[in-house]
């Protein structure tokens, strides 16, 4: 593989949203370190960009991502992996303040973990989700064992992580892994529409809503509700709260200042 000469992602602006397309077609978008570094750098740059209100991450029709890059990892030993802190940079994707939308078509194997790091997960009816690492003699390494268990519960997560069984889009939706399933040819349009909708909201309110939902996975119910209440009180310090509520009363669309 001599892919270092080219980038493995494409980044475009679509209105107030941004679109990142994984672009390693010959390896079905396998997530090597270059992909990781480029996705993380691009999303962090967009996170700092006040013109960007939402980031969509997508792959190809055949593969969102076929997992970590097996050829890149196969010869590594424990010390290589430990010293490089292999995959740790992916955690930063989950730390972004700007909302992210995964638009998943085709294989999401290990790519399932990447999709689960995003806030909204839209699936094409062609999507296939799985954690096949066990079939390679290893285990998930981008948070799959934790994210999947929280998303679909212990029974399904155990079966998937222990046997490598995949879920199709319909099962993934029933299990609560994905926000919605759409026809494959509508996937990108729907994802960009979601992103444009989010990007049109008050940015501080969006960031606080994201923080509040994310906190549900980190803390007790009582602490989570207290955290939400503090943020709820805080939004009353924003001009956008005044604008949003005034617009409702005046029966007109809101013109949020911070978006
Ligand atoms: C490196 C990969 C790859 C991967 C596919 N390719 N997946 N290369 N790492 N994860 C390469 C193939 O070697 C092949 O290259 C080319 O992409 C096309 O793949 P094919 O297998 O020929 O395509 P197809 O027959 O359509 O099968 C698609 C597939 C299969 C079912 C998705 O590729 C597959 O099972 N891939 C591996 C999925 C997997 O086990 N992922 C987990 C990775 S480990 P050539 O050069 O032959 O054309 C992992 C553990 C670490 O993730 C923890 C963090 C995630």
Image (tube, rainbow, N blue to C red):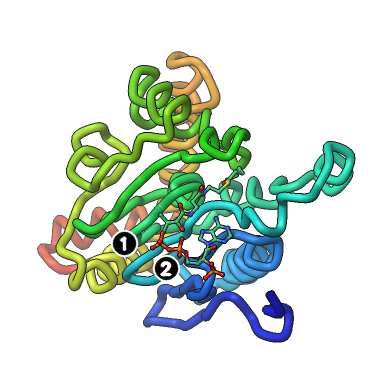
Element assignment for label 1? loop
Q: Mark 1 points at which residue?
A: 105
Question: Does residue 129 show up?
Answer: yes
Q: Residue 253: which quarter of the image?
A: bottom left
Please name the residue shown 19% across and 56% down the image: 125
Mark 2 and mark 1: Cα distance apart in space: 7 Å
Q: Does the beta carbon of the residue at mark 2 sit less than 8 Å from ligand 1?
A: no
Please name the residue shown 26% across and 40% down the image: 172
Whether tag 2 and tag 1 are in contact, CB under 8 A, the answer is yes
Q: How crowded is mark 1: few (under 14 residues within 10 Å), some or many (20 or more)?
A: many
Q: Residues within 10 Å of mark 2 (few under 14, many from 20)?
A: many
Q: In which quarter of the image is the N terminus?
A: bottom right
As displayed, is residue 21 above or below residue 15?
A: above
Please indicate whether residue 172 sits to the left or right of residue 107 in the image: left
Instruction: Name the foreground residue: 18 vs 115.
Output: 115
Q: Name the residue under label 2.
A: 59
Element assignment for label 2? loop
Please indicate whether residue 83 sits to the left or right of residue 169 in the image: right
Please name the residue shown 31% across and 50% down the image: 128
Instruction: Name the foreground residue: 46 vs 180.
Output: 180
Please name the residue shown 48% across and 56% down the image: 66
- Give x and y (percent) for residue 220: 49, 15
- Give x and y (percent) for residue 163: 42, 28
Q: Residue furthest left?
A: 251
């Amino acid at each position: 593989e001599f892919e270092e000469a080219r980038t493995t992602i494409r980044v475009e602006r679509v209105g107030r949203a941004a679109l990142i397309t994984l672009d390693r077609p010959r390896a079905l978008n396998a997530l090597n370190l270059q992909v990781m570094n480029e996705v993380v750098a691009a999303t962090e740059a967009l996170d700092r960009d006040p013109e960007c209100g939402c980031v969509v991450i997508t792959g190809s029709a055949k593969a969102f991502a076929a997992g970590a890059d097996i050829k890149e990892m196969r010869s590594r030993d424990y010390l290589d992996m430990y010293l490089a802190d292999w995959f740790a940079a992916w955690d930063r994707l989950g730390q972004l303040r700007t909302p992210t939308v995964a638009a998943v078509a085709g294989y999401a194997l290990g790519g399932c973990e990447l999709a689960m790091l995003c806030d909204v997960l839209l699936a094409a009816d062609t999507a296939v989700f799985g954690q096949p690492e066990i079939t390679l003699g290893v285990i998930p390494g981008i948070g799959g064992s934790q994210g999947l268990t929280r998303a679909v519960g212990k029974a399904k997560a155990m079966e998937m992580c222990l046997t490598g069984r995949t879920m199709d889009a319909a099962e993934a939706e029933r299990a609560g892994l994905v926000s919605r399933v759409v026809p494959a040819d509508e996937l990108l349009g729907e994802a960009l529409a979601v992103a444009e909708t989010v990007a049109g909201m008050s940015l501080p309110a969006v960031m606080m809503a994201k923080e509040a939902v994310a906190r549900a996975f980190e803390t007790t119910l009582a602490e989570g509700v207290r955290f939400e209440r503090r943020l709820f009180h805080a939004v009353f310090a924003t001009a956008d709260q005044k604008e949003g509520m005034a617009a409702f009363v005046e029966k007109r669309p809101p013109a949020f200042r911070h978006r």
